[in-house]
Image (spheres, grey):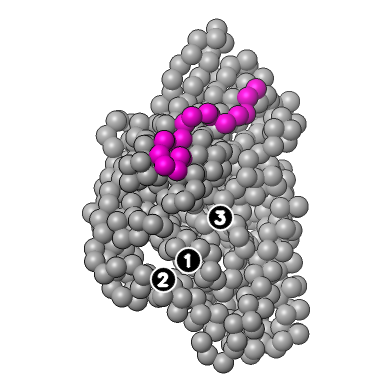
């Protein structure tokens, strides 16, 4: 593999990755919102001067796999100069959904554009119809403020007009501003560490090591693909519904193994929807990247080289390649999970000894907000579920799986500043599917509101259960429950927005994973 030893490459892989990891540490410690500070719903990455992914921290798969598209759009949109910082959340230009705001900073060495630093974080509100910006919508503008690639700093000059306009349109201005400043602090720290590496090793050597790392990842991704027997493998799975009717929505994938390359074809998937379950192409691309990296067991450094042997085919205007003005809030969090299930279902035919049963299949999103103690607030979190049973081991219980890699919000942090009490947080026993290797159990999280609030739920696997593999049983479907002020129980749909009064309760019961084997 070129002129560098494996040990040398490992050292530089760790050095590049440490830049992104330290950016993440600064962001987490500086952020205001629980979603970023506690749940760590953010991602950081380093790119070379051509916008090729060089290294990423172990953050959120759906963020990181889409970031190369974002950087490519920024490079195309501007002639970048020292002191620039670009901000965007445009899902049709490399983004994921509107709450994921990305800041990108080009790094120049002797006036030559040499690297990019990127940080993406999920903000608890970006405007729109409902608090949390994660409810069903019919148009992207109902989901919040869309930010095309915009210079937040132009040669060091701060864009006050954009800043004030954005903050005037979101809920919880102080929290939003604090989180954005934390992202800027992360970029500053990343640049400091990168400049130190350049001073220590020299720009030319860093660039050469980066290219060699990408070549290494490409080589080993091709080796992984060679292990897939030649042929075509088809699978389809379904979203429960679009939130308006009960029709299930098909995600269809055909994987064709071509020796050292693979074609992943989603073009027969359902047309894009009226509501927010649409995924943009960058999300679909991130999902494919994640699944094939998983085949390596973590042995392939995740960079641009690992993407090169993967040919991804989508049809614009479908649920996996939505176009403007399709709403996309749920595509990032829910449809991405179903794309994983479809990919794993196809690969299970080729590599049955390596592929797990379906996991929870939903991020079980809850967002709520309103007025509390004279101020406007918005809150958002995802809730874990059961992992699918695996060859040789049961699935884990109560865990975030696949395209989410976040934590839970500690109850103490949640209750400290918000009008809510978490009355129960427990494993949902026996919700994992039975099998030789049982699926993991889901969770139960019960919120009692102490002040009126608007609550939005966006969840899947409420109608269609996570599948088992090779004789394993499906995991138990999830359930959303509402207890009104009189204690009456109401089963809610998977996607719903409702007004709750003080004393009323929302309980989310998340799906278990499918079982593996008889």
Residue at horizontal 52 percent and vertical 70 percent from the top? 300
Q: Which residue is mark 1?
A: 296
Q: Which residue is mark 3?
A: 60
Residue at horizontal 67 percent and vertical 19 percent from the top? 450
Residue at horizontal 53 percent and vertical 64 percent from the top? 298
Residues in magenta, as a range: 423-439
Residue at horizontal 31 percent and vertical 75 percent from the top? 259
Horizontal placement of 434 versus 164: left or right?
left
Measured from the top left, where is residue 462 in percent x and y? Answer: 40, 31
Answer whether labels 2 and 1 touch (C-beta < 8 Å): yes
Badge 3 marks a residue whose secondary structure is: loop
Mark-to-mark CA distance, 1 and 3: 18 Å
Question: Image quadrant of residue 350?
Answer: bottom left
Measured from the top left, where is residue 464 in percent x and y? Answer: 34, 35
Mark-to-mark CA distance, 3 and 2: 23 Å
Does residue 107 lie above or below 68 as drawn?
below
Density class for disc 3 (Cα within 10 Å; few <14, some 14-19, many ≥20) is: many
Q: Which residue is mark 2?
A: 224
């Amino acid at each position: 593999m070129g002129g560098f030893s494996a040990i040398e490459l490992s050292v530089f892989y760790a050095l590049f990755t440490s830049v992104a990891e330290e950016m993440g540490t600064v962001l987490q410690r500086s952020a205001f919102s629980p979603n970023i500070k506690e749940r760590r719903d953010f991602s950081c990455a380093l790119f070379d001067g051509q916008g090729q992914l060089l290294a990423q921290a172990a953050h959120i798969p759906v963020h990181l796999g889409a970031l190369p598209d974002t950087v490519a759009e920024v490079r195309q949109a501007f002639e970048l100069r020292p002191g620039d910082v670009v901000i965007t959340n445009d899902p049709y230009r490399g983004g994921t959904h509107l709450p994921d705001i990305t800041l990108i900073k080009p790094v120049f060495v002797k006036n030559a554009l040499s690297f990019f630093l990127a940080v993406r974080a999920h903000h608890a509100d970006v405007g729109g119809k409902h608090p949390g910006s994660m409810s069903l919508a019919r148009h992207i503008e109902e989901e919040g403020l869309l930010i095309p690639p915009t210079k937040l700093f132009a040669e060091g000059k701060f864009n006050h007009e954009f800043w004030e306009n954005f903050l005037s349109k979101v809920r919880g201005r102080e929290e939003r501003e604090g989180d954005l400043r934390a992202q800027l602090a992360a970029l500053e720290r990343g640049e400091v560490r990168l400049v130190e590496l350049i001073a220590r090793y020299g720009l030319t050597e860093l660039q050469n090591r980066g290219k060699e790392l990408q070549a290494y990842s490409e080589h080993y991704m091709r080796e992984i693909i060679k292990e897939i027997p030649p042929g075509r493998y088809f699978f389809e799975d379904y979203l429960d519904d679009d939130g308006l009717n009960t029709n299930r929505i098909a995600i269809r994938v055909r994987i064709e193994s071509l020796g050292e390359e693979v074609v992943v074809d989603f073009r027969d998937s359902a047309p894009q929807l009226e509501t927010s379950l649409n995924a943009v192409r960058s999300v679909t691309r991130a999902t494919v990247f994640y699944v094939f990296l998983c085949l390596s067991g973590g042995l392939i450094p995740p960079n641009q080289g690992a993407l090169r042997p993967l040919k991804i085919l989508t049809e614009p205007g479908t649920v996996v390649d939505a176009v403007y003005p399709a709403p996309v809030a749920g595509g990032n969090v829910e449809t991405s999970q179903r794309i994983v299930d479809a990919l794993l279902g196809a690969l299970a035919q080729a590599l049955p000894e390596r592929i797990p049963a379906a996991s929870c299949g939903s991020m079980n999103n809850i967002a709520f907000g309103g007025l509390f103690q004279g101020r406007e607030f918005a809150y958002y979190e995802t809730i874990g579920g059961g992992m699918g049973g695996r060859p040789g081991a049961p699935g884990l219980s109560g865990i975030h799986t696949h395209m989410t890699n976040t934590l839970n919000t500690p109850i103490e942090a949640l209750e400290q500043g918000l009008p809510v009490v978490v009355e129960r947080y427990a494993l949902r026993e026996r919700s994992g599917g039975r099998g030789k290797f049982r699926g993991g159990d889901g969770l139960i999280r019960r919120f009692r509101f102490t002040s009126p609030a608007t609550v939005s739920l966006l969840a899947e696997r409420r109608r269609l259960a996570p599948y088992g593999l090779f004789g394993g049983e499906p995991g138990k479907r999830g359930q959303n429950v509402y207890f009104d002020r009189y204690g009456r129980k109401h089963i809610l749909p998977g996607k719903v927005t409702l007004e709750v009064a003080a004393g009323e309760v929302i309980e989310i019961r998340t799906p278990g994973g499918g079982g593996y084997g008889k």
